[in-house]
Amino acid sequence: MNHPKASPFSRVEQKVGLSKIIIEYSRPSARGRTLFGNQENGEPGLVPYGRIWRVGANESTKISFDSDVIIDNQELKKGIYALYAFPEKDQWQIVFHNNSTHWGDGRTNYNPKEDALRILVLPIKTHDFQETFLISFDELDHNRASMIWSWGNTQISIPIQLDTKSIMQRQIDKELSSSASAQTFYETARYYQEQGIYLIEALSYVDSAIEKGGDTYYYHRIRSLILADLNRYTEAIKVAELSLELARKEGKDEFVRLNENNIRKWQTLLPHNK
């Protein structure tokens, strides 16, 4: 019989750069109970210090990565892992476990020989109370994220790093090795400009995009940004003026404003204005 669970199932999917992290777990609620450590009368709380915790309820909490990651300066291969923790008052051991099939709190089935990775983290005491256990992600950019566990007044933050630059470069190399389109050249140039890398190559790629795809406000906008990054402000202003004109013709008010702002900024950086 299908019936509602006291600790309902939840699934979290987070994109980080070009990689995906998925967490499947159950969410217990505090319901007035002491969560970690001992109660005031000395009796164990829901998760006693030093005892393995399944990081949720019901079956093992699972985390999957579709790319290799770095956690606490240690490499973890892509795959599916069970998450376990050994809470203590001042520090927690966090375990990424190769066997993700266990049911229950882990005390009977957990085998440390099957650990893929262990790290130590410091628990954070929070002012706000989180009634129902929550796993979320914060501090996101192309290359990293923090996995956050929150329950009661305790929070755990686990930094996860990804080598998005290498993943993206492999994709670029593959796309450029065939008959690349104007859009491929443009997206490559835009990515390099956003990351502040390979700017000379980026300029060449956006020129190829313009040659293949013609004059567009967004091609020329990226070209102006690359030139400015190369400190070639006079050229950047001329290209931004062209991008502005093309954007105005298409009614792209936001890009008109962006180009106007850049032109004003770059004019102050010209040698005669210093």
Image (cartoon, grey):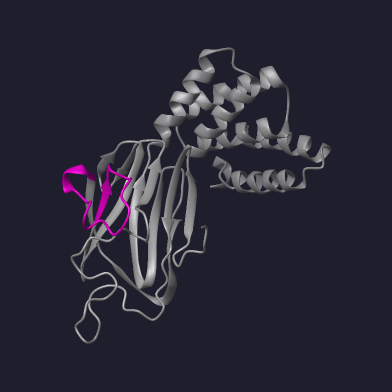
| Quarter occupied by residue 256 | top right
x, y (%) of residue 205? Answer: 56, 22
x, y (%) of residue 197? Answer: 45, 33
Count the marks: how many? 0
Closest to the observer, 21 or 195 = 21
Please check the rendered image and state whether residue 110 is part of the magenta-colored stretch, yes or no.
yes
Residue 182 visible here:
yes
Q: Is residue 171 left or right of residue 208?
A: left
Please check the rendered image and state whether residue 222 is part of the magenta-colored stretch, yes or no.
no
Image point (50%, 24%), residue name: 172
Image point (60%, 44%), residue name: 266
Is 38 drawn above or below residue 28 in the view shown?
below
Q: Is residue 68 left or right of residue 270?
A: left
x, y (%) of residue 158? Answer: 33, 55
Q: Is residue 126 left or right of residue 94?
A: right
Image point (51%, 14%), residue name: 177
Image point (17%, 48%), residue name: 112
Residue 231 visible here:
no
Is 49 drawn above or below residue 181 in the view shown?
below
Closest to the observer, 138 or 32 = 32
Magenta residues, as a range? 94-116
Is 188 drawn above or below residue 32 in the view shown?
above
x, y (%) of residue 71? Answer: 29, 46
Residue that lies at the very extreme toward the front in this rendered image:
1
